[in-house]
Each structure stands twice: as C-alpha cells, then as structure tokens.
Image (tube, rainbow, N blue to C red):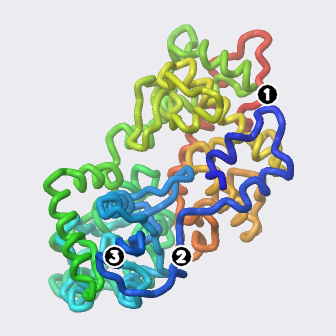
Amino acid sequence: MLPLAAALLLLPLAQPAPGGAADEFANLEVALTRHTRDRYVADLEEIKRRGVLRVLTRNSSSTYFISKGEQRGFQFELVQAFAKELGVRLAIVVPPSRDELIQSLLAGEGDLIAAGMSIAPDRAEKVRFTSTVFTAGRVFVTHRHTIKLVESVADLAQFDIHVSYRSTTYAGVKAAEREAGVPFRILDTGGDVEMEEILDRISAGVYESTVVDESLVALAQAAGADVEARLPLGAPKEKGWAVHPAAPNLADAADEFVRRHRRSGLIRMMYARYMKPDSKFAARARDLEYRADANGKISPYDDLFKEASKETGIDWRLLAAVAYSESRFNPKAASRWGAVGLMQLLPSTAKRVGISKRLQDPRRNILAGARYLRRLCQVFEEDGVAKRQQMRFALAAYNAGLGHIMDARHLAELTGKDRNRWFHNVAEALKLKQDRKWHEKTRYGYARAEETVTYVSKIQSRYDVYVRHVPLDAGDEPELGAQGE
C-alpha cells in the first residue's frame, strides 16, 4: 500500500486520478494506533521475542502527532531510538484519556509509558519510573489581553483556574492555594483534555486561566495563540517513562537508555527540536511586513518564480509569498524535519514531482514547490472545490499535510459548515482537531491547527499586498492565485 505522500504525488499533473481524490485516500492507513492489541505483560526478553515494543502515549504536540504523513513528537523520537537499540518494531498505543495511561499499562495494553508523565509518589507505588527524562517548570497562564493584575500567588483567587482534578497540576494549584491563604476557584477539565487544548480554549476566551508546563506556552504563542505566562508556580517537575513493575529488565534497559542519552545530549537535542521554538520560527510566525525594492522586485528570485508560474499556472507573486513564509527567501534554509530550500520541501516530495537532485538550487526548488502546490490544487478540484478556493486548501495541505485537511472538511460537514470553503468554514473545523473529543473522530488525529490557519492567513495577506504593489508583466495571466471571498 502506498504511503499518503506517494499516493498524492504519483497522480499525473494534467489528468486527475480516476474515481476522484476522496477515493484515492480512503483506504490509506494511519500510523496512529488505538489500544486494540492483545493484552499481555512482557519483560525485555519477551518483547525481543515478539519483536515489538508497545508504547503508551498521548496524541498531542508535545508527545506524539502526525504531520505531513509522518509520525513525529518529542516522546515518539525518543522511544523510536530506544526501540531501534532493542532491535524491535515500535507500536504506538493511544488510550482514550491521559487518566488511563497507567491503567492501560497495568492491564497489559502497552509495555512502556512515554507521555511526559510527572514522577509522583502515588504513581511510583503502581509503576516503576525511569530516571528523569526532562524537567518542566509550571506557570500560571491567562489570555494575553487580560486586564487583571497578577503579582503574587494570592492574585490567582481572581480567576477561574481550569485544570484536571486527576493531575499532579491540581495538587500544585491546591498547594498554591494553601500558600495564599485564600480560596481559589478551581474547575475540572476532565482527564481527557490535553494541556495544549486548554491553552487553545484560553486563547479563544472559553477558559480564563490554567497552570501548564512553561514550554507549552512558548509553543502555543509561536503558533499564534493569545496566551501569556503570568507567574511561575511551584518547583519544576521531573518527567519520566514508566514501566510495569513485573518487567524489571525492561525497566533497567529503559533507565539505562535515559541516563546514557541525557549524557550524550540526544534527549536535550530532541527536547530543543520539539519544545523550544527557535527564533526563526517565532519571527516567521509574527512577521507580516511587506518587502520590495524601489523597482518593485519582491525578491532576487522573481524571474524564477515567473518561470515556475508559466509551467504551473500559479501566480508567481503567490509563489513568492509562500517562499517568504517558508524560508524568508533563504535558499540555504533547512528545517529540523529535513525540508530544504526556498520552498522548504522534503527531498522525497520533490522527487515525486520530478526534481530528484540539487534541491537547494533555487530554480529547481521553486519549480518543485510550484508543481507540488499544483498537484494539491488538482486533488481539491477533483473533490469539488471551486477554483477560487483551491489554492487556500492547497496551502493548508502544504503546511499540515493533505490528510489533516481532508479530516477538517469532514468535520466541517459534521458541524454544519461548508466543506468547500476555507475561511470561516474548514479553517474553523480544522481547529477542532486540537480538541480530543473531535480529533479522535478523524483518521489523522491531532493537528497543530492554529499554526496552519495562521499560515494560510498570512500568505493570503502577503499575497494581497504583493498584488497591490507589484503588477503582472504584460501577457501574464496566471490561472491560480488566492482570490478574495
């Protein structure tokens, strides 16, 4: 069975695939597995005999998620490296809620928990923890524009504080309440709501405040969320992996792996990759200024954008807007995921649109990006999206992956929105994939939706400015742009 990217990119450029785009993806498998495997408790020797390590985790941006058809996440990459060292296959298992992680481990539904779980005495009575994988300070968080002052712990009494009653965070908030000497209004979110989801709800004005790991606030802000850390709360918490108490050899192997790679720097490197948004990403997330020289040139690569436009029919100014958003016109840009060049393409993606070598060459990189966008447009055209809307959907898929956007169109239908319009419809439905009760109804699970919605909006805004300031050359009539509603 072809992977998602291959199924998409093997479509002919000029002719759509028979049966429609929806049929093309209907039977593709997703790596995200549910807790439907046989139940058994296995120690290291049995795991090696079976050839599989089952890891219990959560579907969130800080642990495990699928992006552009690839499994990713801080915890995922670590346990993938551990499984590779053991010489076994990795199987990801996602229980229905965070509260069920330990229950699922003890029931034999997984071999190891890797979900950013705090090492706590009550938990250590049930499972065996490894050494500390990382530590995380907790902070009190509100909407960025709240007018209430927060200068001391006692000021938290002004707010509705949303946390799960079954979390170690709740215990920390109760300790702060005792320190303040005044009652707090603490509201239960339930155990199935991820910290990222709580931050999204604060940004949307649904919740007033919460307490979360500090690193998650920076990630949410970089993705466009209107949240702000107002006050540190308590001592940093140690996070570790957990193993069934009846698997001492596995516990020893996991502990040795963690200790060794804290020394080697692997854990620190993976943490920085996923949990500390770099300055380039943060700048990209907030930058909307228009840049053009006195002669109206957008970039040093305008002629190359125009060449790609002639082949693909995509407005060269839109290609320039994408390139600026992706790389700020840096042909040597390289992402942590392996994407390279002006258009930030994976070599495997470029190869499937006919560009197999020298991908950092600006001409080849731009052409590959334009061809890929054209093929994405073709998929949405085959699935009934009007031409004026196709590019917005293509941009969203360019950023998040086609599967997530197909999911969002399905959610749009379920919630009474138009599955063939982006702004205020599918864009809003995509945000539901940040909420567990919705993303579990979809094929591709959790998505960093705010990042994708912001990505499309900023490219649209930049393109609008380019159109106003940089006219097309005589005779240039591109077929595809990002027209207004």
Q: Nearer the viewer, residue 273 or 348?
A: 348
Residue 34 has which mark?
A: 2
Q: Nearer the viewer, residue 211 or 19?
A: 19
Q: Residue 412 appears at what percent x and percent y?
A: 72, 63
Alpha carbon separation for disc pair 3 and 1: 52 Å
In the depicted view, which residue is nearer to us: 125 or 418? 125
Position of residue 401 in the picture relative to residue 252 (left or right)? right
User: From where the camera sits, is residue 87 visible?
Assistant: yes
> Does label 2 or label 1 sit earlier along the sequence?
2
Give the residue pinned by disc 1.
479
* Number of marks in the rendered image: 3
Q: Where does label 3 land, which residue? A: 112
Q: Residues within 10 Å of mark 2 (few under 14, many from 20)?
A: some
Nearer the N terminus, badge 3 or badge 1? Answer: 3
Gap in angstroms between the C-alphas marked 2 and 3: 15 Å
Q: Quadrant of the C terminus?
A: top right
Q: Is residue 464 visible?
A: no
